[in-house]
Amino acid sequence: MPSLLSVLEAHPRRTLQAIAASHHLPFSPRRPKAEELARLHRLLNDDARLRRTIEALGPTDLAALRAVQAQGGCMPLIEFCTAFGAIRPYRPWREDSPQAPWRAPTSPAERLWFLALVGVQGDVICLPDEVRDALPALPRLAPEAPPPVPPCSPDTLLTDLSSLLGLLPRVGGGIRHGRWLPPRALRAINRRLLHHDDLEGVRSELQTNRLRLLHYLAEVGGLVSAQNGSLLPTVSAWRWLDAPPGDRWAALWAAWQADMRQHHRLWDIYRLPGVSARLWDALWVVLADVPVGQGTSIPSLLLALRPLVPGEGRMRPALTGLLGGPLAGAGLAAFDGVTVALTAAGHCAAAGDIPALDEPSSASLVVGAEALRAVVPPVCHARPYAEALAWAGGEGRDLVIGPVEVHRAAGLGMDAWDMAGVLAGLVGEPLAPEAVERLGAWQRRARRLRLGRLWVLSSPDPDLLADLRGRRRLAPAFGRALSPHHVVVRPQHVGTLSARLRRRGISPPVKASPDGAAPHCDQAMAAGTAAYLWLAVTVYRRLSRFAPLPVSIPAQVAEDIGGLLTPGARDDLRQIGDELIEALARAIRGLPAQPAPLRGDAAASREAVEAACRQQTPITIRYLDAAGQASCRTIEPVMVFEQGGAWYVEAWCRLAEDLRTFRGDRILGVGTDS
């Protein structure tokens, strides 16, 4: 720190004369500056005089000195002048310069300047050593008995945040104003949290506490984003869930700290306590001095904070809201409304260290007659638990998996293998064969019914429909007749049929779906781009049977992209994906490339299959799959169509108990159903 002599030496003669006048000391303009400087320094460098000068200051002037003292004797000049006013230069030769400004200073900063109690070095305001020694010590925190330790901790915060990420693909649709979750989603998420919010009468997310904090941390950490009208986890979220607990906490705390120092903060958008960046930093400096196991009162804390945040205004409401809300919810502070203390995790955060976190424990799986029940500990493996929440049932932390939950998972594009992999990660070991068999049986039961959209051409004139179905160029577009007035149109031929009908002067209107709801997707995306993306997403999700996926793509993403495609286009792409997965499976097993299909009597096979489709009767076929394995199976044909120079039959397979698509040139022979 500079000495009083160096501060005086930096001033020109006219300013030294003003300083002497402020202290009512003599100053001769005719004597050399060095002599007058030495005499002024000798008179001012007196402990008794300095103490009397400081005691005569007003409260605001003294607060300005305390603010510089609290920052170690140096403070940025712009910050000092912003809080305590400007310092006008003394230029007596100019007409617009104030006369004798030391007699009526316009700000506390100017008063201290003309009393030589502060000096400027570059862009920093400084306290001379002599002045700093004459100032009384800063107020210290009065020790108090610590408040009770809060039930929340960093462990529970990380666990609840994992629950939020896992439930968003299930309930995150229909967000309000591009960010906020609707009440139904809030209630669904709240039931799964370790520490619940009271949602009685809550109609907005901004009225919640725990849920709002979790959403804020998820967004500030880059773990969630609004995607086509839904709030969904980002790619970074799945890597965050895979990380060890210490790394997850460190990333979250760093993002929180960085946001608090931004000019445009998410903190303010979420209407969390109105704490400025200066008060946030000062709070951690002051509370870090409270020993572990002790607390302090709010009045004592405010007295200690005041010199560090000059000009802050009323701090108590924002401070109590911060201590009793976000900091207590994160397990960093204990607050009972009167006293406050940092927890052990809070002291680690103040020091920039990672707190001691519990290691994840494995869940236990109970195989029941009607369902599987996973008993989940408070701190579990984050990634599989988040993935399971997207489709599993149950209340609280425990998970229940039965036929309904398996059906829900199948709707998300998962099969029994995927579900078993998620549960194995949760329990920390491979599932028992009995549990895997249950999942497979429930999956087969779930696939007995399939709900899908059907394209139907209807007309009050049955003769017109019969005439159109009999025309050679239009016949391939039609499926079975539902009635004399209704006939099924094959999805892949809808566009072609519409164009050919228009050329004949017929333009049938297209009726919207009953619900009238449009998919949440970006209509500006080209159909070709959507086809590539949908193929990539669906194939990527199916790779989970070969290796754990580093990122779990929510099923909503595939639905949004698929909403831009026609059903026929999705079927074509799904067929490409099936062939790719089959080829990959063969390559992993070390088998040769797919052999050329062995052809039987292709014409006779197709004729028999088309006849069974028209008559709605089952038929038995001998079929050679992509792996080169022949099998005999009974199918119930739904439709026959051509694609890429080959013909296919879509049918219900009694062997697989699922709706399958069979390639015609792989049918080795046909027979009647026995």
Image (spheres, rainbow, N blue to C red):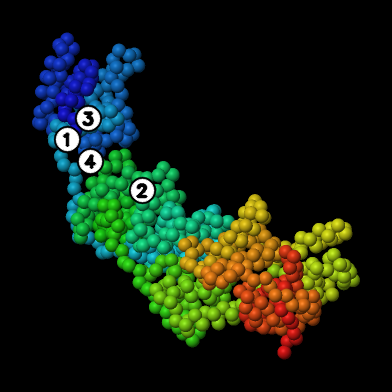
Q: Earlier in the sequence, mark 4 or mark 3?
A: 4
| Cα separation between marks 1 and 4 | 10 Å
| Residue 427: mark in rendering | none
Q: Earlier in the sequence, mark 1 or mark 4?
A: 4
The residues bearing labels 3 and 1 have C-alpha atoms spaced at a distance of 10 Å
Along the polypeptide, which appears first: circle 2 or circle 1? 1
**CA separation, marks 4 and 2?**
19 Å
Count how many numbered circles sit on residues in the image: 4
Residue appearing at x 67%, y 66% in the figure: 571
Above or below, 589 relative to 325: below
* Residue found at x 75% / y 86%: 672
User: What residue is shown at x 21% (from left), y 58% (from top)?
Assistant: 292
**Contact (Cβ within 8 Å) of mark 1 with mark 4:** no
Q: Which mark is residue 132?
A: 1
Residue 111 in the figure: left or right of residue 429 = left
Q: Which residue is mark 2?
A: 275
Which mark, residue 70? 4
Which corner quadrant holds the N terminus?
top left
Crowd band around label 4 with a 10 angstrom C-alpha radius: few (<14), some (14–19), many (20+): many
Q: Is residue 136 above or below residue 450?
A: above
Q: Residue furthest front?
A: 592
Estimate the spatial distance between the alpha carbons at disc 4 and disc 3, rounded to whole Å.
Answer: 14 Å
Q: How far from the left and from the top, in percent, is residue 652?
A: 68, 78
Q: Is residue 304 visible?
A: yes
Kind of residue at disc 2: Val
Tell me where residue 669 appears, x and y as whole percent.
Answer: 73, 81
Say which element carries label 3.
loop
Q: Quick one: quadrant of the C terminus?
A: bottom right
Q: Residue furthest top?
A: 30
Give the mark, 4 or 2, whose residue is nearer the N terminus. Answer: 4
Q: Which residue is mark 3?
A: 118
